[in-house]
Amino acid sequence: MINARQSEYLLGCKEKLEQLVDILKNEYDYVSVLATDVSGLSYAVNRKTSSINEFRDSERGFVVRVYCNGGYSEYSFNRLDDVNETAQQIITALNAQSSVLESSAKLKTPLLEEEEAEGEFAGEVSEEFYRPDNEKILARMKRLRDKGMAKEHVVNCSVNYSMQLVNKMFISPSRNLIQAWGVSYVSCVMVLNKDGDTQFTNFGDTGWQGSEIIDKQADKMDQAYEDVVKMFDAPNITPGEYEVICTPAAAGLIAHEAFGHGVEMDMFVKNRAIAREHMGEKLASTITNMYDGAQGVRQTASYFFDDEGTLAQKTQIIDKGYLVSGICDALSAARLGVKPTGNGRRESFERKVYTRMTNTYFGTQANSLEEMIKSVKYGFLVDGVDSGMEDPKHWGIQCILSRAKEIRNGRLTGKIFTPVVLTGYVPDLLSNISMVGTDIELDGNGHCGKGYKEWVIVSDGGPYLKTKVRLG
Amino acid sequence: MLDRIINILQQAEVSDYRLMELTTVSHQAFFVRQKLDQHRISDTVHVTLDVYMDKETENGRFRGKASCEVHPNETDEQIRAQIEKLKFNALLAVNPYYQLVKDEKYREERVSHDLYGALKTVVDAMHGIQDTESEKINSYEVFVNEYYYHIVNSQGTDISFNTMDEQLEVVINSVNEGHEIELYHVINFVDRTAEEITSEIMDVFRHARERNRAVPTKKMDKVRVLLSGDFNDSFFEYFLTRTNTQAVFLGYCSTKIGDNCQESDQCDKITLRAVAHLDKSSNNLPYSKDGNKAMDLTIIENGIYQNYWGDQITACYLGLENVSPVYNFIVEPGSRSAEEMKKEPYLELVQFSDFMMDPIVGNFGGEIRLGYYFDGNTVIPVTGGSITCNMNAVLKHVYFSKETRQLNNCIVPATIELFDVNVSGEQ
């Protein structure tokens, strides 16, 4: 492993960007610039084709944030030639837009007071990120695909692998930060057709590691196949409240949807989250702990500073059942009079910052999965995350899971039900958590939206959890 | 910039290439209540380069493709190095040969729209909305975007065109006896008047008010369900996925032209047509990124699949000579009026927390945010609970309303009538 290298492109732009900040600070009370250089390769193989393309979230560009007359505005661009010309372009365009919006009253926002910070941060990556052996990577993927295609009823097995190098630089009069890290993603989708019916299953892994992650999927494939074959004949679940054991992936979805969105503090500013009124209250069972943070774990949403130049941290959201903290971007923090938590993130340099989750997960306790299964008289082990939708205003939750494995008298019966819609009231679900496993597993293959846009990469997970919740 | 890259490509010994330059200008404003949170402008150029390398073997002719973005500040030397990497990677990932779109020509000069003015129109419309006693605007975001596409390939295709779209994301609060709820609503549009925007927001106010006085949905077995929401487009997009060349090629769907997806007499037969242009749609792209012209195309007629649509590569693999992208579509109205559908007891669903459609397996449904239950005497707003259905079962017994409505890039029946649906809810 080596330390990720800082982007030559960003370092090459640094002087010009510092000049840009110098020029703009004569015009504005606050100026910062975030520069991004995100690159990588995505490899794909399926039953008939293969490809190597640029990573989907690659980008290279700049965003300037300024404060003037009590309000913030931003200008995103990706050409940097003459600095004076660029500065003039920014001033002219933002002034024109300010005039157009002149009749709008401004949301009161204090001037950001940044503590001085300077630093160069690098995560550890394998040399492979800089000199990938593409032939070897494709061969690994094809081996996995062939294993999948050899299974009965499988009509397509696609394997996707990506390596992403993230480089960002933040410059303001008081901050000068640069960071680099790398992350890899593997995902596999098997599509099965039996007598005209179609079912599919997906699985994968992510982390700060190289292409060896591909080989680790072979065992997961066998389990996923065993489950998906049963889904052809699986009945719908009878709607009702059940004892439910969540796999780490299902627990992650709950952590993300149940409380993650509900404690994004830009929602507090808009009075859109009920959590604001319940800080310090007991909302979960005493064995429940929950965290979010770009620091503390090494996953796809780990970084050293966020898109506003705030240093990353690990935030404990639930402590022994008590809601103790939200997560916050810098502008929302200024409006709420609290400290930012390093959760200000953008979909890309072209989009606005919102408070966003990073790596969100439940903490561990001492229960084994076997103990949990033994304790269930009639219930389900739910798995296969499809999607989720939050309701921070009322703590409603909806999670779509692909399967529920039946447990009767402390044993898995081998029977599967599908699909599964998990719904409920978040404090009930969290208060019903009665057993928590010993090991955290995180998956970062998902993108999280704010509403139905602003997609950012997040990871979530936890240990196995036992709770009681409505399934339909 | 394209000329510079083409000059380099011409000396690079590639089998083929495709370049797409997308120039985007976006003006954005963000409000909390009616106060300006911040405003933004984004002005960018993105160039995507695909390099194709061919290889003849004893098993036939093969083609590999590799892609990257060429950034505006890259030097000629850096671009040359990128192309060499793409050539190498393309030859590692070869697939059966396919052709690029040949000699397609279409030229529009770049047009600069008055984005400041367009932003002001939407913001003024929103400022004009008065809170009611129970409903108020919580927050909203306005995006006004213009795009200029220039697509060139080494087979003589040279296409350029302008498009524009606007997006308004609104959150509404409604209070009833101290209980506050919110509704999230997104409108994608182009060329709307202030009155049209206001009218749509007033509808959201009405839904918010109804939801706030709704009672929990009861658990019901085999109930008649009417789908009458913004999600009705997702119901019909199922058929677009089933006829998409990529989905068929990869085996996600086994749809064959001539297949009947509704072998039953207890239903309105689906007729779905793709249209190249639809007034007021924000999706009127005249060409695909491959360079294929968007055409009017019948996808399903009377329940029978008529045509595939999709991208150039998978269309070639399926042996199609011409393929069209689908950006807009129209579904023919059904046989029954909404009024007729509402004569007998029903559960009409107008909002889900997130309507999910799995077009591969055919499962759809979600948690109910707002519905109306008619027991034969009175109509009661309901909320909570969920439905889960499967298309294979539903299509045997389904009716569509005579009334249609436009949901940005499609016109679909305003109400879809389903039978024997199990509803999860309060016991």
Image (tube, grey):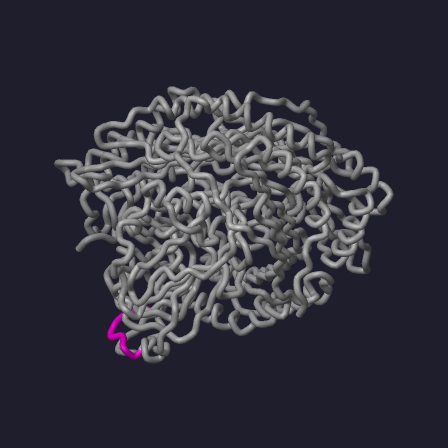
- Which residue is located at x 77 percent, y 37 percent? B155
On screen, residue A130 above or below A112 = below
In the image, is B218 to the left or to the right of B171? left
Q: Nearer the viewer, residue A154 or B220?
A: B220
- Residue A376 magenta-drawn? yes
- Which residue is located at x 33 percent, y 65 percent? A319
- Which residue is located at x 27 percent, y 77 percent? A375
Q: Nearer the viewer, residue B313 or A43?
A: A43
Q: Position of residue B221 (x, y in %)?
A: 22, 52
- Residue A358 magenta-drawn? no
The answer to whether one can see residue A233 in this image is: no
Q: Nearer the viewer, residue B41 or B223?
A: B41
The stretch of residues the image draws in magenta is A374-380
Q: Position of residue B299 (x, y in %)?
A: 51, 37
- Which residue is located at x 34 percent, y 59 percent? A420
In the image, is A207 to the left or to the right of A384? right
Looking at the rendering, which quadrant does residue A402 occupy? bottom left
